[in-house]
Amino acid sequence: MIEFRGVSKEYNGQLVVENFQVDITDGEFFVLVGPSGSGKTTMLKMINRLIEPTDGDIYFNQKRLIDYDLKELRLRIGYVLQQIALFPNLTVAENIELIPEMKKWSKEERRARTKELLMKVNLPPEDYLNRKPAELSGGEQQRIGILRAIAAKPDIILMDEPFSALDPISREQLQLLIKELHKELASTIVFVTHDMNEAQLLGDRICVIKNGAIVQTDTPENIRLHPKNDFVAQFFKHDSIVVESYCVEDMILAGFILENTLSTAEVSVTPEDKINTVIHLVNKHSSLKVVKENEVIGELNGDNILQFLETKVGGEGK
């Protein structure tokens, strides 16, 4: 899907991205994580050619990005920023329909798609279609920003710390939303964050970057169990220590397990399993059955975990 081959970027003689070699597979939720200034956003912007590499090549579907018509390329990519960047003079509907209109969708198709998407994020079309961004809360504006990015069904969605400026409740809600939309759309998502907890919760794979170089790329579970060096171990531990202190039993006691003794989920967990282990499993399966003493006692999914952690990490881990 997306391949970085020896990609470097230099500004005024200083390397900010050095010899990136990484593949992002079709339909993957790929998270770039690292300290501020590590090169995450530069890497992201090179995918839609807001920034051009100094050296190396980036491929999209086995064709060099530089060989694509720039407009054609960007129409296949959705982009969500931390700074929500809706057009203030346009209505909600007009903001969402920008790319579909550029792609020559009919007015009827555009409006049907807009209504469909608003319903998915619990914003009733009759109440929101004609509102202006100034009439929306921060969380509502970011929802519209996400819908604008996905409205034309892009192949790739780029997200640059899209939730970091939001309050904890809005952030949790949007994390749940993007997980569900990713499952439904099957688009490739490249997501930038400096928060390892968020990276674990959302990513199929995590790419840890430091000082413009890729340090380790692997699944959240493998990075946790097999960090490549002390930097990865400490960075992961610093952001994950609160999460690591909880297990499924804590979710049961707090009432975050769904009562379903007839669960047909294929994969099971026990009350003793750590939340970090369960996060990895739930990223691969829609739901997990909870088994205690060889009996199914309930079921959990990604929503349950995020809601539980918000009550814990939101108060203790920040």
Image (tube, rainbow, N blue to C red):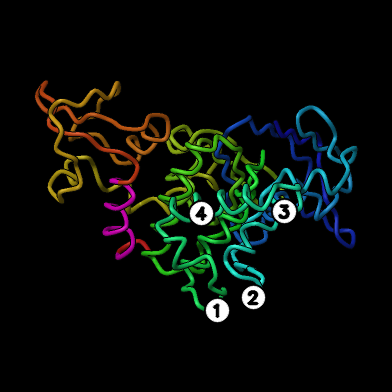
Q: Which residues are magenta?
A: 304-315
In the image, 115 versus 248, the foreground residue is 115
Q: Amino acid at mark 2?
A: Pro
Which callout, 1 or 2, points at the residue further toward the start of the chain?
Answer: 2
Query: Which residue carries the number 1 mark?
Result: 134
Mark 1 or 3: the one toward you: 3
Quadrant of the frame with the N terminus: top right
Residue 235: x percent and y percent? 50, 51
Which callout, 1 or 4, points at the residue further toward the start of the chain?
Answer: 4
The residue positioned 63% from the left and 63% from the top of the image is 95
Report if the CB atoms under discs 1 and 4 are less than 8 Å apart: no
Distance in Å between CA atoms under marks 1 and 4: 20 Å
On residue 88, the disc is 2
Distance in Å between CA atoms under marks 4 and 2: 20 Å
In the image, 233 versus 118, the foreground residue is 118
Residue 197 visible to an observer of this rendering: no
Query: Which residue carries the number 4 mark?
Result: 115
On residue 101, the disc is 3
Distance in Å between CA atoms under marks 4 and 3: 15 Å
Q: Is residue 97 left or right of residue 72?
A: left
Q: Amino acid at mark 4?
A: Lys
Distance in Å between CA atoms under marks 3 and 2: 18 Å
Report if the CB atoms under discs 1 and 2 are less than 8 Å apart: yes
